[in-house]
Image: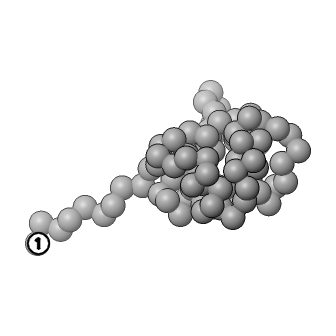
Amino acid sequence: MDSISEITRALRAGRALVGLSQEELASIAGVSRHIVVRLERGDDNVLAESIIRVRTALESRGVVFIPSEKGRGPGVAETRPPAASDG
């Protein structure tokens, strides 16, 4: 299982990857900007529901969360639009 610090780093990286401000992410996720700040800071008293809302908001913007594996922590990537058919 990923540690809280790994999860918060992945969420922060996901936000940066898609170019959202903390305010924009908070609005999309339906949480306050203060929650996003606390989450990205790694505060351990953020509700799991808030973490799920932020993650879901990022996924709706094309962020893919890559689970950690032996030897490396979790990561993020951005989905790519489907390639145009050469028809």
Q: Quadrant of the N terminus?
A: top right
Say which residue appears at 63% left-offset and 61% top-offset: 27
Q: Is residue 68 left or right of residue 4?
A: left
The answer to which image quadrant residue 52 occupies is bottom right
Q: Is residue 64 left or right of residue 73?
A: left
* Relative image position of residue 66 (x, y in whole percent): 57, 46
Residue located beneath label 1 in the image: 87
Q: Residue furthest top?
A: 71
Asked if residue 41 shows in the view, the reply is yes
Q: Is residue 59 left or right of residue 79?
A: right
- In this view of the protein, which residue sits in the foreground, 32 or 4? 32
Amino acid type, callout 1: Gly
* Relative image position of residue 45 (x, y in whole percent): 88, 44
* Relative image position of residue 51 (x, y in whole percent): 74, 53
Q: Quadrant of the C terminus?
A: bottom left
Scheme of image coloration: one colour
